[in-house]
Image (cartoon, rainbow, N blue to C red):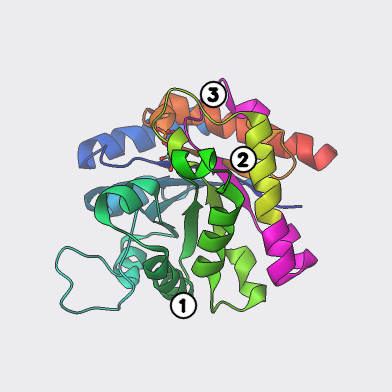
Amino acid sequence: MRRLVAGTGWKMNNGIADSIRYAEELRSRIAGLDTSAIDIYVLPPFTSLATAANAFAGSPVAVGGQNMHWDDSGSWTGEISASMLLETGCRYVELAHSERLQHFGETYEAVRRKVDKAMSVGLIPIVCLGETAQEKADGRADEVLADQLLTSIDGQPDERVPEIILAYEPRWAIGAAEAASPEYVEERHRALRTILRKHCGEEIAERTRIIYGGSVTPENGRDILDIKDVDGLFVGRAAWKPEGFARIVELVSDAAKRKQAA
Ligand code: 13P
């Protein structure tokens, strides 16, 4: 049984004061929920990380960075290392978000190096995978996903792959009006698990978590979570306010109970 995940990336939102308010309110809103069967993360901007890590200390909510550099230190102006993230209290790091690929020229070859570094210091990488609208229209989605996934995990021993969280985030569904349809999500998640099965074996494929992100809301989240190969939700806009994320956390905890009972 894979532990389900409820995560949110704050992107460039929530400075220090807002992070404290967010953490206080989220903690009180989820205090009555049984979240013991799921993993919860928030990804604040770098300048809010230490504050958020402190504000969530002792709660079920862990904190992560939205990016990092692959090197330990050196002449990389504007960059942040894995050990710096750890030092602020991070447990996770997001890699290959579509906005980083689109606006900042991130490549999966760089992502591969970052995965390697993150794993070596004990951070959990959340690796985003997703096709563009054009690649979807050309019928190339699964081919693109295979390429992104296999590049990202290249060099990792198979037994370490389940430590990585894979996030299927179709690039055309991020920041959009609607999420991908549950049927479409089901096909892509199944394809990703098949790729894992082929390259890492059945047992590794069954243990690796693949979560969905892209215009998730408290309204559409339940249908997506009910898909067999979906192991959680990765939410942007709908979780930028604590009440929104609290509803997502509740949906994911309920889905974990349903999946356990099935
Ligand atoms: P939205 O939920 O705002 O579409 O963003 C999703 C996202 O970027 C998750 O990483």
Magenta span has 204?
A: yes
Whichever of labels 3 and 2 marks the residue nearer the N terminus, that label is 2
Horizontal arrangement in the rendering, residue 69 relative to residue 179 (left or right): left
Nearest the viewer among 137 and 49 is 137
> Cα distance, mark 1 to mark 3?
35 Å
Q: Amino acid at mark 2?
A: Thr
Ligand 1 occupies quarter? top left
Whichever of labels 2 and 1 marks the residue nearer the N terminus, that label is 2
Nearest the viewer among 2 and 203 is 203
Q: Is mark 3 within 8 Å of ligand 1?
A: no
Q: Are marks 3 and 2 in contact (CB under 8 Å)?
A: no
Look at the image and tell me whether residue 10 can be seen: yes
Helix, strand or loop under label 3: loop
Q: Residue at x 18, y 72 (%)?
A: 76
Q: Would you name the residue on which mark 3 appears?
A: 218
Q: Amino acid at mark 1?
A: Ser
Horizontal arrangement in the rendering, residue 86 relative to residue 209 (left or right): left
Q: Residue at x 49, y 24 (%)?
A: 178
Q: Would you name the residue on which mark 2 appears?
A: 35
Magenta residues? 194-223
Nearest the viewer among 84 and 56 is 84
Residue 208 position (above or below residue 114): above
Magenta span has 110?
A: no
Q: Position of residue 148 (x, y in %)?
A: 51, 60
> Cα distance, mark 2 to mark 1?
28 Å
Quadrant where the C terminus sits is top right
> Cα distance, mark 3 to mark 2?
17 Å
Look at the image and tell me whether residue 32 can be seen: no
Looking at this rendering, what residue extends furthest in the front direction?
A: 138
Q: Would you name the residue on which mark 1 appears?
A: 120
Residue 149 position (above or below residue 180): below
